[in-house]
């Protein structure tokens, strides 16, 4: 008797409109509640966005996360608090697949980078004398 192959269910990604709706809710929380967004240098903001969003994504997806360095532990604390707050405030997260969470979080990271770095009119971010 031939062995049957089991197929993994195909992950369905969300349409862009839904991603934007969810992203804006997550973004609104950061802009209103998270002090880490106010680093004074562009490179600090780049590192914080990369690390905090990546760690928050892993936490929301139930993936293993090891914070080895003091810097990693600092980002981890912010990511842990953010993931906890997101789970409390946004019940729709429980209905998303891992891939959908990653899709929303990637969109969030892109938007954060624009608002806090590349699209910011804050000249202090790139002032070499500051």
Image (cartoon, rainbow, N blue to C red):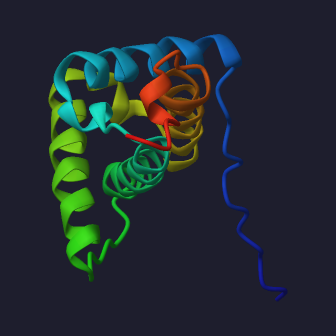
Placement of 49 over or under 118, stated as above or below: below
Residue visible at 35% across and 50% down in the picture:
52
Left or right relative to 12: residue 74 = left
Residue 89 x/y as whole percent: 19, 22
Q: Name the one closer to the observer, 3 or 66.
A: 66
Residue visible at 15% across and 44% down in the picture:
81
Residue 60 x/y as whole percent: 34, 48
Which image quadrant: the C terminus?
Answer: top left
Placement of 70 over or under 19, stated as above or below: below
Residue visible at 19% across and 32% down in the picture:
35
Placement of 69 over or under 88, stated as above or below: below
Placement of 109 over or under 27, stated as above or below: below
Q: Name the one closer to the observer, 45 or 124.
A: 124
Left or right relative to 63: residue 23 = right
Q: Name the one closer to the observer, 105 or 8.
A: 105
Instruction: In the displayed orientation, state which residue is furthest to the right.
Output: 2
Left or right relative to 111: residue 25 = left
Instruction: In the displayed orientation, state which residue is furthest to the front.
Output: 129
Which image quadrant: the N terminus?
Answer: bottom right
Residue visible at 24% across and 32% down in the picture:
86
Residue 20 x/y as whole percent: 57, 15
Q: Name the one closer to the observer, 81 or 125.
A: 125
């Amino acid at each position: 008797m031939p062995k049957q192959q089991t197929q993994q269910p195909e992950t369905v990604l969300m349409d862009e409109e839904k991603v934007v709706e969810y992203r804006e809710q997550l973004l609104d929380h950061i802009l209103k509640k998270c002090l880490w967004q106010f680093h004074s240098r562009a490179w600090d903001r780049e590192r914080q966005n990369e690390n905090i969003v990546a760690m928050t994504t892993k936490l929301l997806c139930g993936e293993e996360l090891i914070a080895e360095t003091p810097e990693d532990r600092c980002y981890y604390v912010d990511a842990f608090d953010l993931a906890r707050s997101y789970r409390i405030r946004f019940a729709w997260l429980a209905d998303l697949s891992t891939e959908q969470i990653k899709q929303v979080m990637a969109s969030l990271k892109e938007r954060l980078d624009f608002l806090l770095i590349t699209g910011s009119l804050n000249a202090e971010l790139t002032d070499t004398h500051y």
